[in-house]
Image: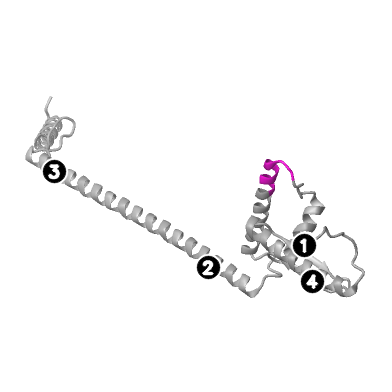
């Protein structure tokens, strides 16, 4: 015959009660571990014996589990077992956002209290990796800008050379056509040579007029009519 169904009530015998407590406690912790592994759940178990001895198990940090439980209870974010899948997804996203914000604050040097040496070392490595990425990006931008400036300088130098060649060609063309070698300058419609002849003729005319005026005066003084 099989064993009869055990009545769930307090065991009066102290020895039997302690044996049952030990077996059931181990079985409960085993089930909690299996639940955590199989379902990727965060599980925490806290047990006090009748003699106030503490037994506990947590799939991660017991402190973080308790803090999360207290926050969820306070904010009313805890979900019932048979909630809407959309609400469950929203809860997961909310938790991911919370974790990202915590990581961001830690990367900014905030809320570092409570972190272990190992966690601080990991955080330092993340910051160093990020800093290396920033430096590499800055160097790449500077290199691109220098290359662009060199390219523009080469273009300007080439344009100057082309302009110089065009000016030389233009001057050569003018000299061949006789436009650049002529030194004749016209004043009041006369060239340089014509202007000189005109001025000499004017001076001769003025001299003749003066001589004629002198003869006329002499004639009048010495008895002319």
* Of the image marks 4 and 3, the number of the one nearer the N terminus: 4
Residue 169's disc is 3
Q: Tell me which numbered mark, 2 or 3, is placed earlier along the sequence.
A: 2
Q: Circle 1: is it few (<14), some (14-19), or many (20+) Cα within 10 Å?
A: few
- Spatial CA span between label 1 and label 4: 25 Å
Q: In the figure, is residue 177 to the left or right of 66?
A: left
Depth check, mark 1 against mark 4: the one in front is 4
Disc 1 to disc 3, how far (Cα)? 90 Å
Give the SS element for disc 2.
Answer: helix
Q: CA distance from mark 2 to mark 3?
A: 62 Å
Tell me the distance, in whole angstroms, between the alpha carbons under discs 4 and 3: 108 Å
Q: Which residue is label 1 attached to?
A: 66
Asked if disc 2 and disc 1 are in contact, CB closer than 8 Å, the reply is no
* C-alpha span from label 2 to label 1: 32 Å
Which residues are drawn in magenta? Answer: 82-91
Give the residue number, with chain letter if any, for mark 2.
128
Residue at the image position 61 percent from the left and 63 percent from the top: 107
Return the residue nearer the eye: 131 or 222.
131
> Could you tell me residue 50's position as x and y percent?
88, 71
Residue drawn at point x = 64 percent, y = 53 percent: 96
Neighbour tally class for label 2: few under 14, some 14-19, many 20 plus, Cα within 10 Å: few
Nearer the camera: disc 4 or disc 3 = 4
Residue tagged 4: 22
Q: Is residue 35 visible?
A: yes
Give yes or no for residue 84 being in the magenta stretch. yes
For the C terminus, give its image quadrant.
Answer: top left
């Amino acid at each position: 015959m099989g064993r009869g169904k055990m009545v769930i009530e307090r065991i009066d015998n102290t020895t039997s009660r302690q044996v049952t407590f030990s077996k059931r406690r181990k079985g409960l912790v085993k089930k909690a571990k299996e639940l955590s592994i199989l379902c990727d759940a965060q599980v925490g178990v806290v047990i006090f014996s009748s003699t106030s001895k503490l037994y506990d198990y947590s799939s991660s940090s017991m402190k973080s589990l308790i803090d999360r439980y207290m926050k969820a209870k306070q904010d009313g974010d805890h979900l019932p077992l048979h909630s809407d899948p959309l609400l469950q997804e929203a809860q997961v996203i909310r938790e991911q956002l919370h974790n990202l914000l915590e990581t961001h604050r830690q990367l900014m040097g905030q809320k570092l209290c409570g972190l272990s040496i190992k966690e601080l070392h990991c955080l330092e490595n993340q910051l160093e990796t990020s800093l290396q990425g920033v430096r590499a990006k800055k160097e790449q931008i500077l290199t691109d800008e220098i290359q662009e400036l060199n390219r523009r300088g080469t273009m300007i130098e080439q344009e100057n050379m082309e302009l110089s060649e065009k000016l030389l060609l233009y001057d050569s063309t003018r000299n061949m056509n006789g436009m650049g070698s002529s030194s004749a300058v016209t004043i009041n419609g006369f060239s340089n040579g014509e202007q000189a002849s005109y001025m000499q003729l004017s001076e001769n005319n003025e001299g003749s007029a003066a001589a004629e005026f002198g003869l006329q005066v002499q004639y009048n003084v010495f008895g002319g009519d």
